[in-house]
Image (cartoon, rainbow, N blue to C red):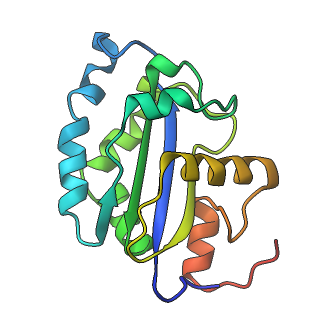
């Protein structure tokens, strides 16, 4: 399956900082979040970004996703297609921050990002994103909820068996 007509790509990723937000060991990350978000918002193919509401995040409980709630961070965004998201993630300064994530965030034993198709104009909620992530963590990747590798296969139109 290739990207469905009339749909964009939603992406949700999550992580727990190794240290508190005010710890100097995560200062480089914390001090650049707004800068990277502004870059994303100007990048060709960017559609929308959820403005994190800490109170909304605090209400959600999920042992596989939400760890150390006071150090938890997420990104929920919508992109025109996978190429646009990959361009931003791996062909801008964001790549440097992505490569340093191990210094700032706890390691993940399982996936820490999920993708799914949304109709043009739809702005997914955090609870919708968590539901997709939960599904993928429990059942594996499918066209309903998938990760980077599966997304690339879908974008290339490869036949998939799920």
Q: Is 57 or 8 nearer to us in this picture?
A: 57
Q: Is 121 or 117 nearer to us in this picture?
A: 121
Q: In the rendered picture of this protein, how many numbered marks are placed on residues?
A: 0
Q: Position of residue 156 (x, y in %)?
A: 57, 83
The residue under the point 38% across, 73% down is 121
Q: Please, is residue 97 above or below residue 123 in the view?
A: above
Q: Position of residue 138 (x, y in %)?
A: 79, 48
Would you identify the image quadrant in which residue 44 lies?
bottom left
Q: Is 111 or 48 nearer to us in this picture?
A: 48
Q: Please, is residue 85 above or below residue 76 in the view?
A: below
Q: Residue furthest bottom?
A: 5
Q: Is 7 or 21 nearer to us in this picture?
A: 7
The residue under the point 31% across, 61% down is 48
Q: Position of residue 11 (x, y in %)?
A: 48, 57
Quadrant location of the C terminus in the rendered image: bottom right
Query: In the picture provided, is 132 more to the left or to the right than 35?
Result: right
The residue under the point 47% across, 63% down is 10
Would you identify the image quadrant in which residue 4 lies?
bottom right
Quadrant location of the N terminus in the rendered image: bottom right
């Amino acid at each position: 399956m290739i990207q469905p007509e009339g749909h964009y790509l939603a992406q949700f990723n999550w992580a727990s900082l190794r240290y508190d937000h005010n710890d100097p060991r995560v200062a480089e990350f914390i001090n650049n979040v707004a800068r990277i978000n502004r870059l994303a918002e100007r990048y060709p193919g960017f559609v929308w970004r959820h403005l994190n509401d800490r109170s909304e995040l605090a209400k959600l409980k999920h042992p596989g996703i939400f760890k150390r709630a006071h150090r938890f961070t997420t990104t929920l965004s919508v992109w025109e297609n996978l190429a646009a998201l990959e361009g931003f993630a791996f062909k801008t300064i964001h790549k440097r921050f992505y490569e340093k994530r191990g210094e700032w965030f706890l390691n993940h034993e399982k996936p820490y990002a999920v993708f799914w198709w949304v109709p043009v104009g739809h702005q997914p909620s955090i609870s919708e994103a968590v539901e997709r992530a939960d599904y993928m963590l429990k059942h594996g990747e499918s066209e309903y909820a998938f990760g980077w590798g599966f997304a690339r296969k879908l974008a290339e139109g490869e036949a998939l068996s799920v």
